[in-house]
Amino acid sequence: MPVRTGVVGLTALALAAALAGPASAAHASAGAGSAAHVAAGHAATERAMEAVVRSGVPGVTATAGDRRGTWSATTGVGDLRTGEPRGGSDRYRVGSITKTFVSTVLLQLEAEGRLSLDDTVDRWLPGLVRGHGNDGRKVTVRRLLNHTSGIFDYTEDEDFVRTYFLKDGFLRHRYDTKSPAELVAIATAHRPLFAPGASWSYSNTNYILAGMVIEKVTGHSYATEIDRRIIAPLGLRATSVPGTRTTLPRSSSRAYSKLAATTTGPTYDVTTLNPSLASSAGGMISDSSDLNRFYTALLRGRLLPPEQLKEMKTTVTAEGIPNARYGLGLIDRTLGCGVHVWGHDGGIHGSTSSATTTADGRHFLAFNFNGDWSGDSDAVIDAEFCSP
C-alpha cells in the first residue's frame, strides 16, 4: 500500500510474496528489569520477525518498550555477502517516516504564528504548482499534510519509475541529484487526481512541497529545521537528514532490492543512493531507539502544544487502507485486537520500516527490514501490541 512503500511508489515493491529460506533465531536483549521477564513479553514479536526472514527478507532489527522495560532483537543477516547478522543499533533509511518530522516542524511554525495551516501553497511558493489543472492557489498546507490535495505523486510517474526503481535505470542513475522543484515539475506535468479536499490519495509530492514551505518561511532548509527543532533537543544521535550523501553512517547493514516488477530473480545491493530523490518526503536516516524516542516525545506533548498536537491527530479517511486514518503526517491505526496506535510506515529502496506507539507513549515499537520485496509488517505490529 502507498503508505507502506512510502517514496517507493512502484507496486512491485509492495510487501507481498514469500521466498524460500530458513529463518535464523532471533537475538534479543533487554534494557530494564529482568531480561527474561522483559523478553517473555515479546516472544510473539520474535516469532513474527522470524517469519519475515523465512518469507525472504534478509534481516530484521527491532526495539520495543512497555511497562516491563525496553527490549531489542535482531534476526537474519545484515550482509548477504559476509553473513554478518543484523545489529540492534543499525541505522537505516526510514522513508516516509520522514513525513512525521516534517509535519512536526510545520506545526511548530504554526504555533509560533509564522504560518497558518490554511495558508495556500501559492502564498509561500507562488506560481510553482501550476499547469495541467494544478493550482497552488486552491491547495492549503493542511491539504498537503493530510494528503487531500489531489496533487499527483511524482513517484508514480512512469518515466521516474523506469529511471529510479527498475534495475537498468537505477544502476545508471542511483547517484543523480534531483532538486525539489524538479520533483514537483514531474508531478504537475500530470493532472490532479481530484479537486483539493474532494478525496484522499497518498502523494509524496505533498511533502516535497511541505519541505519547500519550511524553507520559504524560515530561510533555512527543512533539514536544518528538523535538526534544530527535533534531533538536537531530543538527543537523537542516530538520526540525520542526509541531503545528497549517498552512504549510511555506521553502524548499519546492507539494503537489498529486486529492482524489478517481480518479487523473484536476482537481489541487488542498493545501500548507496542519492536520497535527494526522496528529499522531505522520505530521505531521513535513523535507528529503532531514536524513532521510539521521537514518537514517544511527540505523543506525550514534548514537541507540540496541545492545540497543534490535536490538529496533527485530526484524521481523514485513508482510502484503501483498512482500519487506518491519516492525520497530519501521522497514521491512526486500529489493530485487529482493538488496540489503538499512532505512527508511520516508510519504504525506500532496500528498506522497509515502521514506528508505532500507543497514544500515551507507554508502549512503542520500531523496526526495519533490509529488503523491500517481502515480509509482513502488520504481523509484527499485531504480535507486539495484541499478544499478552
Image (tube, helix red, strand yellow):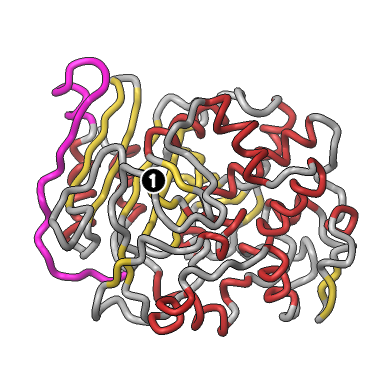
User: What residue is at 23 percent from the left and 69 percent from the top?
Assistant: 18
Left or right relative to 44: residue 181 = right
Residue 120 position by quadrant? bottom right
Residue 66 position by quadrant? top left
Q: Inspect the image, locate mark 1, and give the three-letter code of the amino acid beneath it.
A: Pro
Q: Give the labeled residue for mark 1.
A: 249
User: What residue is at 82 percent from the left and 73 percent from the top?
Assistant: 134
Q: Which image quadrant: the C terminus?
A: top left
Left or right relative to 49: residue 6 = right
Magenta region includes residue 20: yes
Is 285 located above or below residue 7 in the figure?
Answer: above
Is 324 located above or below residue 14 in the figure?
Answer: above
Estimate the x, y position of residue 35 in percent, counting from the top left: 17, 22
- Judging depth in this view, the residue of 178 and 205 nearest the camera is 178
User: What residue is at 74 percent from the left and 46 percent from the top?
Assistant: 214
Magenta region includes residue 23: yes
Is 148 located above or below residue 356 in the figure?
Answer: below
Is 54 located above or below residue 165 in the figure?
Answer: above
State the count of labels: 1
Q: Which residues are magenta?
A: 16-41
Estimate the x, y position of residue 26 in percent, counting from the top left: 15, 43
Q: Counting other residues with Cα less than 10 Å from the Cα at mark 1, is it few (<14), some (14-19), or many (20 or more)?
A: some
- Judging depth in this view, the residue of 344 and 40 nearest the camera is 344
Left or right relative to 127: residue 377 = left
Instruction: Tell me which secondary structure the magenta stretch mostly adopts.
Output: loop
Estimate the x, y position of residue 279 in percent, counting from the top left: 59, 57
Whether residue 151 appears in this view of the structure is: yes
Estimate the x, y position of residue 1 in percent, counting from the top left: 47, 65
Left or right relative to 62: residue 286 = right
